[in-house]
Image (spheres, rainbow, N blue to C red):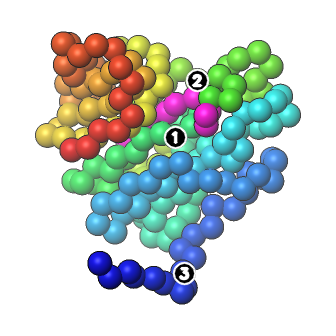
């Protein structure tokens, strides 16, 4: 096998730092469809004490140049899954978990995060500027991944895989009721 190496890398976009804590922002998940790219990030990613301020965000090149999307309406937890709608790159689905490595569960005693929220699955139709909670009847659990397939959403959670009746996320059901309750970390279409 031939080894391919590169001596140079080009910086496409810098996520920078969290303006409140100066913590370096770290990419948590990405999705690419054609030229459309979304990158979920956090900084600080681990919530260690009441002085550490967790902050998530989304960077994208959809709509022109690379920029941080406003992500208004998106709860402030670890972005674990992301899926671009291939029919419309302005539509993106995002799933949320707790904090990286669950150092401290979201919402625990003295958690300084003001926007933990209760949503697990979110949808944006304007390239990440605004999000709507489409968790519907899902149990409140960590959602690790999301896939859009044949007009339905499939998600992997800490308690199994679920499927929606459509892309609105109003009704969810276990993907296979015969499976025992097991964490599902990754789903692929």
The residue sitting at the left extreme is: 150
Alpha-carbon span between mark 2 and mark 1:
13 Å
Alpha-carbon span between mark 3 and mark 2:
37 Å
N-term mark: 3 or 2: 3
- Secondary element type, mark 1: strand
Q: What stretch is highlighted in magenta?
A: 93-101
The residue sitting at the bottom extreme is: 7
Q: Which is more toward the observer, 123 or 138?
A: 138
Residue drawn 40% across and 45% down?
Answer: 82
- Secondary element type, mark 3: loop
Give the quadrant of residue 106: top right
Q: In which quarter of the image is the C terminus?
A: top left
Residue picked out by circle 3: 10
> Residue 97 colored magenta?
yes
Please tell me the numbered disc located at residue 79: 1
- Residue 18 % position (x, y): 74, 51
Relative to 159, say whether 146 is above or below.
Answer: below
Alpha-carbon span between mark 3 and mark 1:
25 Å
Residue picked out by circle 2: 117
């Amino acid at each position: 096998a031939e080894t391919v190496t590169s001596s140079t890398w080009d910086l496409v976009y810098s996520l920078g730092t969290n303006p409140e804590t100066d913590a370096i922002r770290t990419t948590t998940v990405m999705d690419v469809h054609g030229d459309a790219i979304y990158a979920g990030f956090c900084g600080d990613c681990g919530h260690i004490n009441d002085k550490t301020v967790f902050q998530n965000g989304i960077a994208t090149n959809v709509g022109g140049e690379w920029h941080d999307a406003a992500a208004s309406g998106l709860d402030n937890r670890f972005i674990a899954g992301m899926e671009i709608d291939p029919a419309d790159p302005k539509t993106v689905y995002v799933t949320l978990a707790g904090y990286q490595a669950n150092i401290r569960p979201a919402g625990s005693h003295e958690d300084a995060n003001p926007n933990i929220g209760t949503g697990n699955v979110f949808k944006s139709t304007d390239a990440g500027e605004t999000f709507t909670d489409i968790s519907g009847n899902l149990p409140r659990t960590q959602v690790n991944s999301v896939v859009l397939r044949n007009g339905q959403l499939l998600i992997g959670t800490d308690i199994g895989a679920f499927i929606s009746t459509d892309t609105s996320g109003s009704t969810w059901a276990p993907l296979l009721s015969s499976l025992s309750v097991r964490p599902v970390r990754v789903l692929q279409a």
